[in-house]
Amino acid sequence: MEILRNFHFLKNKIFILYPKRRKILFERLKTVGAVRFFTEGHEPTGWIKAWLEENGFLDTEYKITKKGEVLGKDLKNAMRI
């Protein structure tokens, strides 16, 4: 979850010299509920929604904010590489 909070800093720097490790990291991230919410539209559990709201990715009605849209777009782009 901390990776998601700081993903805007890390997206281009994560294992830049180790592509195999980068690929493994993103394969593991695909199984995280919050990442699946942004990439696949999967319905997250309550505590994930609360965490996303606390960190500004969702509003009080659990709708995606601009910050959440940017995170979703960045996650999708990073997982394609």
Image: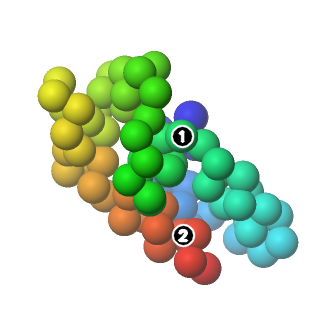
Label 1: state its secondary structure. Answer: helix
- Residue at 62% across / 63% down in the picture? 13
- Rendered view: 62 above or below 15: above
Q: Residue at x 44, y 59 (%)?
A: 39
Q: Is residue 11 left or right of residue 31?
A: left
What residue is pinned by disc 2? 78
Q: Residue at x 20, y 50 (%)?
A: 66
Q: Residue at x 78, y 74 (%)?
A: 19
Q: Is residue 62 left or right of residue 2?
A: left
Mark 2 element type:
helix
Mark 2, Cα crowd under 10 Å, few <14 / some 14-19 / many 20+, is some
* Residue 63 image offset from top left, x and y in percent: 19, 39
| Type of the residue with mark 2 | Ala
Residue 29 vertical placement versus 80 (above, below): above
Where residue 5 sits in the image (x, y, percent)? Answer: 47, 38
The picture quadrant where one finds residue 60 is: top left
Q: Which circle's residue, 1 or 2, is located before the other in the chain? A: 1
Disc 1 marks which residue? 33
Q: Position of residue 65 (x, y in %)?
A: 20, 44
